[in-house]
Image: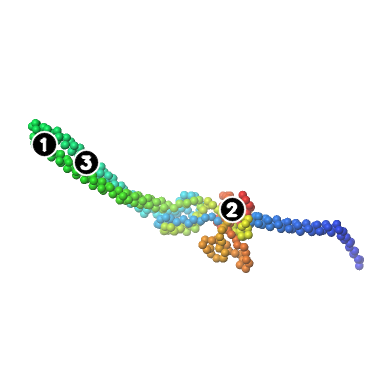
Amino acid sequence: MRQVIYPRVVRTPLVRMALHVASGLVVLGAVTVGIYVSYLYYAFPRTDDAYVHANIVGIAPHVSGPITELVVQDNQFVRHGQLLFVVDPRPYRSAVDKAEADLSLTELEIRALDNSIRAANARQAQLQADVAYDQQYLGRILPLLSRHFITENDVFNARTRLEAAEAAVTSARSEVAKAQNELGQVGRINARRKSAQAFLYDANLNVEYCYVRAPFDAYVTNLNTAVGQYANEGKEVLSLVDDRTWYVLANFRENFLAHIRPQMRAEIYLLSYPNKRFHGHVQGIGWALYQENGASVQGLPQVEETLNWVRLSHRFPVRIVLDDRDPEFPFRMGTTAVVTIKGNR
């Protein structure tokens, strides 16, 4: 058998120094990479525990009655002011007619009283003019009696006419006072008129309420009704997903919160559009959190823990408003998102 002889490696001081330097560089590089990775980890917090949200508003009529017209379909997009459905307006229109009639009767009564006062005042003025004329006439003929140009019977007739005119004036004053007394109860009559006006306003408002319209741009959801279904006042008929503002609730671990501030930029990727990048900004960080698993308490958000045998840092909801919209990539509530905080805007 041939003997293999390997060359002997001679490690000179220079070689040993080079090896030490190389080892040190490797360790330094590993530490540097670790520090850099740790910096990125905290400088740009990231989570995939995030979901798209929007405000959902239940739509309920202000009046009760059967639905006579259903204009929209489930999942349909509607514009602000667009008609959604109609509650039978006929009984409410009848109430408008009655309220208009009551108001007209009240106005007629007020005008009749006013006209009676005007007529009584006019009659009183005419009678006072007659009294003044009769007084002047009597004053002119009295000197003629002593000169025998007239008879005592003429004077008697003139005095009789004057007394009758004065009595008529007294009667007219009583009529004016009576009419003014009836109209003088202004508070009662005005209260009746205001009440009739209020009933008419409410009746017209109820007719308007029969036509239920979208309060904002939205998507129809949870539509479980049909024409003929009785709609109750205050009971939801459908829901609207508010399309004006979309946001992401991203649950970040509490050790990330020191690196997150309102107005910081954020990048969002949605599971439904994995190749599309969206931009947003931090609106705020939750101030309270229910610490035990289970239902929310007093409205506090509750985030389920994934492990119960290890003490984990809690996750707080961070609200991130989506800034850019693309009609080709519509948002849907509940979509899973991946969020990275990118620093100040």
- Inter-mark Cα distance, 2 to 3: 82 Å
Q: Pointer 1: what residue?
A: 155
- Camera-side residue of 282 and 49: 282
- Checking the image for residue 124, the label placed there is 3
In the visual, does 273 lie left or right of 152?
right
Asked if the residue under mark 3 is in contact with the one under mark 1, i.e. CB atoms within 8 Å, the reply is no
Q: Amino acid at mark 2?
A: Pro
On screen, 276 above or below 289?
A: above
Q: In x, y percent, where is residue 112? A: 27, 46
Q: Amino acid at mark 1?
A: Val
Q: Pointer 2: what residue?
A: 262
**Residue at position x 16%, y 36% in the image:** 135
**Which secondary structure, mark 1?**
helix
- Of discs 1 and 3, which sits in the foreground? 1
Question: In terms of sequence position, does the residue under pointer 2 or pointer 3 come before the other?
Answer: 3
**Residue at position x 14%, y 35% in the image:** 138
- Checking the image for residue 293, the label placed there is none
Find the residue positioned furthest to the right. 2
Question: In terms of sequence position, does the residue under pointer 2 or pointer 1 come before the other?
Answer: 1
Q: Amino acid at mark 3?
A: Gln
Asked if the residue under mark 1 is in contact with the one under mark 2, i.e. CB atoms within 8 Å, the reply is no
> Does the rendering let one see residue 85?
yes
Mark 1, other Cα within 10 Å: few <14 / some 14–19 / many ≥20: some
**Residue at position x 67%, y 55% in the image:** 40
- Camera-side residue of 308 and 127: 127
**Residue at position x 48%, y 49% in the image:** 80
Query: Which quarter of the figure has residue 31?
Result: bottom right
Query: Which quarter of the figure has residue 133?
Result: top left
- Camera-side residue of 138 and 10: 138
